[in-house]
Image (tube, grey):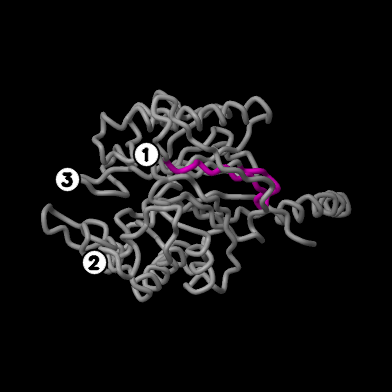
Amino acid sequence: MKNYFLIIFLIFIPKIANMQNYQHQQYRIVTYNVENYFDNVIDSTNVDEEFLPEGVRHWTTSRYKTKQVRIGKVLVAIGGWTPPPIVALCEVESKKSLVDLIRYSGLKSFNYQFVHYDSPDVRGVDVALLYRPQQFKIIYSKPIHIHFPTAPDVKTRDVLLVSGKVPSGDTLHIFVCHLPSRLEGELESENRRIFVAQTIRNQVDTLISVYKNPNIIIMGDFNDYPDNKSITQTLHAEQLTSNPQPDKLYNLALPLHLAGEGTYKHAGQWGMLDQFIVSGNLLNIKNRFYTQQQDAHVFKTDFLLEKDESDLGTKPFRTYNGYTYNNGYSDHLPLYVDFWFKQEEDE
């Protein structure tokens, strides 16, 4: 009888050892509008004169370097001193500003690279994707140009599409977006955000038609809230249910918004202009790379906030209040989502 149990035990040892080779590891992805991260070199193709040393904002080399240090500090802090593998940035001006960020801020020791294309935006503010190549291997990238058929002279930033592999071997298709602003008024500018959202939705539908259950992430500053038309009716980004469908889109920022959280404060109210939308396949915990609703968070640490003198509580500690230099971080707070992956350890 003893020999019988010994044989059974020896049979199952390899299976037990193989199970122990699989561990759930964290993979943090961030989206952050960094508020006018301009370099301070004149660019004849952009209207960037206000962000020059002699411009109305007096954007000196010292202020530019301080901004770099602050962005780097935020990203290091979000990662708990291990910076996140993927970061979507909104409101960056140029390749130079990104090169300086990864070389001269607190990110310099972490081998970041980036994907960025100059867009036709009049002010020159673009989106970009920072990534750590040992944790995200780029397969493909492209800018998605926006052409408004009823306003051909209006220029806005591109949407960035980047596809790459994560350590589990899965491919992510990432859209980084910064939809047109509300400066002209919410209703007056709504059609432009809807048009950009439809452009993204068309690209999503193409991915779904080409790939079986693709892993899609759409993140950035939407300049709309999770319950606005561009999100709910155009992108068709829903609230997560108990049974997510692999080819549907789910907005992980919606429950945070409904709970009164936000990345941006306007007229005394917090709201989720920055959002994180995923395809349902990424919400299947049986997959090797996945996330859950509770893994979405606003990074609302003390050093990113200041007292709100006009309204109650706090507000983002921004770089400028109007044209007055405030020496802060950004008028937005970062939003991040933790993913989890299963990777077989080296034997």
Q: Is residue 42 left or right of residue 243?
A: left
- SS for callout 3: loop
Q: Decide: marks 3, 1 in contact (CB < 8 A)?
A: no
What's drawn in magenta, residue-wise? 156-172
Q: Which residue is mark 2?
A: 326
Q: Which residue is mark 3?
A: 267
Q: Could you say which is closer to the camera, residue 269 or residue 16? A: 269
Indicate the position of residue 323 as horizontal and vertical percent values: 22, 60
Distance CA(mark 3)–CA(mark 2): 19 Å
Q: Is residue 312 above or below residue 98?
A: above
Mark nearer the N terminus (1 vs 2): 1
Q: Amino acid at mark 3?
A: Ala
Q: Is residue 73 left or right of residue 330?
A: right
Mark 3 against mark 2, which lies toward the viewer? 2
Q: Decide: marks 1, 2 in contact (CB < 8 A)?
A: no
Q: Could you say which is closer to the camera, residue 163 or residue 170? A: 163
